[in-house]
Each structure stands twice: as C-alpha cells, then as structure tokens.
Image (cartoon, helix red, strand yellow):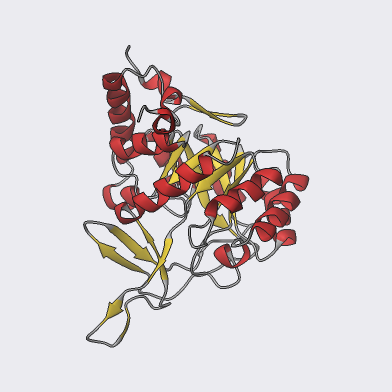
Amino acid sequence: MRADVAELAVEIGPLRLRNPFLLASGIWGESGESLAGAWDAGAGGVITKSIGSAPRPGYPNPTIESYSDWGLLNAMGLPNPGIEEYPREVAAARARGATVIGSVFGGDAEEFAELARRLAATGVVALELNLSCPHAEGYGTEVGSTPDDVAAIVRAVVREVRVPVIAKITPNTPDPAALAVAAEKAGAAAISAINTVRGLAIDATLHRPVLAHGLGGLSGPAIKPVGLACVWQIYSRVQVPVIGVGGISTSEDALEYLMAGARAVEVGTAVARDGIGVFGRLVSGLSERLDALGYRSAAAAVGAAHTAPS
C-alpha cells in the first residue's frame, strides 16, 4: 500500500493540486521568482502576497518578533506593490510552470470584486480572499468578522470572476465556523482557516510594545491547536473543501489537519524559519506516514478523526 508522491494529489473543488502543501500568502511570495522557487522546491501550489488597489509600504520596523520554539508575531501592514504592478510577478511564476493562487484584500465588497477581477485576468487558478488579517486597519478581520460581511464580499467576488473563490477566515471571532457557512452560501468554492491570531509583545525595559504597530498576528506551532479546532468545526458544518492553516511544520502536523477535515494545508512560518526546502521534506514525510498507516492517498485521510471508533 505505498502512498507515493503521485498519490498525494488532492482536489480542492475544481482544482487539482499535485500535493496538499501550499505556500501560504505573505510568505516568500513578493516576487514571481520566489513563488516559482517554492514551486520548484515541491509545493503543490503557491499563493501570492495579498494584493491591494495601491502600493503599500507596510508598517515601520520592527515588524516581526521571533520566538524560536513556538512561532512569530508580526505586524507587516500588508505591504505589496499594488494591482498595477503585481501581474508581471504572476506571469513570471506561471512561466516556470507554477500553480498560482492569487490573494487579494480590500476595504469593502466593491473593492474586493474589482481586485479579484483584475487578478483573475492574470491566469491564477483560484483566488483567496484575505478576510482575516488581524492588524491592518480597515481590512482583514475588520471587514470579515461577521457572517453578513463575509457573505457580501464573497458574493460580490463570485459574481465578478470565473475562477474558484477561497474565503480565508479569521479565528479572532466567537464563531469562525459561522463565517465559513456564510462564505459557502455566498458561493465560495473552499474555505481556508485560519489566519494569524491577534497578539502582543511588550518590551518591559522600554515600556512599550515590541512591534512598532503594537498589535500583531501570531503564527507558527503555538497556534496549531487553534487552527485544528477551527478546521474540525468547519468541516462539520460545510460541504466545500477546507484548507488548513496554522503551525504546520512537520508531516505529522499536516496529517493531523487532514484528519481534522482539511484537504490541503498552507505552510508559512516553517518556510520563513527553515526555507523553501521544507516542502520537499513535508511531501516525503507525509507519503511515508500515510504508507505506515495504510492510507493509499492523502484524500483517504481527510476527516478520518471524525469517524474513528470511540
């Protein structure tokens, strides 16, 4: 029962990925060359930086606080070159054969729809909507924290594009699964969960927050239980595929997400920490782990923890 690399292929709605590991948005995706590098390293697909209507420099430094054992706290401020400039980067990645998913952020449904239309025209295979950045004023969680807001944005984008739409939802709300249900009803082809968890670090000597912006988003191993819980709950309440995000550093982490209900996973902090070579290790490790457990494919493990005997 060998689960080789070919059997790691998964389907996310109409999309077929060569393996379940996606480069997360905001990590290694500033340029087409870096996106292609992650693809060449073994990622099943790559997600762009979140792109907005105009260039944004992001917040001033310091923007990242690193915790070696459990992750990163960051407040980057959604830096990006803007929709006018970014299509050339998508073209560069696609020219190298990469499966590219575009990510967009906006302040309202109209802005999301226009950005989605323009990025979809670049040839991306799907669009992920950033409804969940926890620290950018006027964007992310601030426009995606209620079911009504999520539904309005997803509905506007779905009307405008012909590629699958993925709603990336926030954990910084009382009921993330309700946001996923709203996105599904509005036409989302998949749900990705979660984005970073709102956090803060204080420099006691300087009597002020470590990050220049103050509040940031926590990522990495520390948030894996939160991500798993959200995926578990969402899987029980929607029919569309779920993409797991949060703290995936090893093949065992990925397998846990699959068993919780995710069909694919996004890898971010592990790439920032260990480089894009992590994709090759994750792919081979998951293949071996599936084989040891008797699974013929990654898809066969999806949701397995929901049906395990008590």
Q: Is residue 103 shown to the viewer in this render?
A: no
Q: Quadrant of residue 281?
A: top left
Q: Quadrant of residue 21?
A: top left
What is the x, y in percent for residue 304? Answer: 41, 29
Which residue reaches farthest front?
310
**In front of the other: 101 or 4:** 4
Q: Is residue 32 rendered to the left or right of residue 182? A: left
Q: Residue at x 39, y 78 (%)?
A: 212
Which residue reaches farthest right?
159
Q: Residue at x 59, y 52 (%)?
A: 178
What is the x, y in percent for residue 242? Answer: 52, 39
**In front of the other: 101 or 97:** 101
What is the x, y in percent for residue 16? Answer: 54, 27
Q: Is residue 45 shown to the viewer in this render?
A: yes
Q: Is residue 29 rendered to the left or right of residue 219? A: right
Q: Is residue 101 rendered to the left or right of residue 110? A: left
Quarter of the image with the C terminus is top left
**In front of the other: 235 or 263:** 235
| Relative vertical location of residue 39 with respect to residue 130 in this rendering, above or below | above
Quarter of the image with the N terminus is top left
Q: Residue at x 35, y 50 (%)?
A: 225
Numbered disc total: 0
| Relative vertical location of residue 56 with respect to residue 39 in this rendering, above or below | below
What is the x, y in percent for residue 251? Answer: 30, 35
| Relative vertical location of residue 293 with respect to residue 99 in this rendering, above or below | above
Q: Is residue 57 rendered to the left or right of residue 214? A: right
